Amino acid sequence: MAAGDFVYYNNFLVALGNKEVDLDTDTFTAALCTSSYTPDRAAHVDIGDITNELSGGDYARVNLTTVSKTLTGTALKWTSDTIDFGNPVTLTAKYLVIFDNTHASDILVGYIDLNTGGGSASSTTGPFEVAPDGTLGWFTIDEA
């Protein structure tokens, strides 16, 4: 099982440019969706556009912790601590979706396919964690 790359929702870049999203001070939250969700980076704008989010049982949305951005040369890296959905939990998810929970409409930031091999990621009475890339963080914007 290999997690895919972080994919921005198009509206996030517009909201970032319009200063509607503050990468330093806003609260960002992670949600998990089943394989029945079909990400649409062009059409999906806010959390209300997300379908097939997990519900009940061991699942709850999780706020990102230790969120930071760093500029190295021309590269802006945005990252956080590993997102921990709990231990022990029983969960099966296809997509991790990050959104800005501070913004009134909960602007979608981006998503990750948790298993690019076609399946889903799961945990049965164990930990369920999703970590940012050690080098790129959740995302890196680079002029070069």
Image (spheres, grey):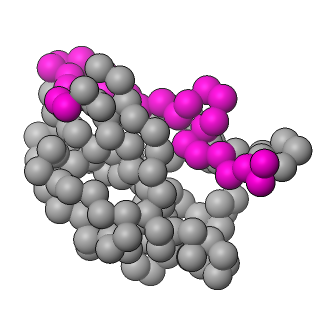
138 falls in the magenta region: yes
Task: Please determine whether, in this image, residue 122 is positioned above or below residue 141.
Answer: above
For image coordinates 56% across by 30% down, the residue present is 133
Q: Where residue 54 sits: x, y (%)?
A: 16, 48
- Locate residue 84: give its quadrant: top left
Residue 2 falls within the magenta-colored stretch: no
Q: Position of residue 138 (x, y in %)?
A: 55, 42
Q: Is residue 119 left or right of residue 70?
A: left
Residue 100 x, y percent position in the rendering:
48, 64
Q: Nearer the viewer, residue 57 or 37?
A: 37
Q: Is residue 107 visible?
A: yes
Q: Find the magenta span and give its range.
A: 118-144
Residue extending furthest toward the front: 144
Q: Identify the residue at horizontal 37%, vertical 63% (top origin).
A: 41
* Quarter the N terminus occupies: top left
Above/below status of 63 relative to 128: below
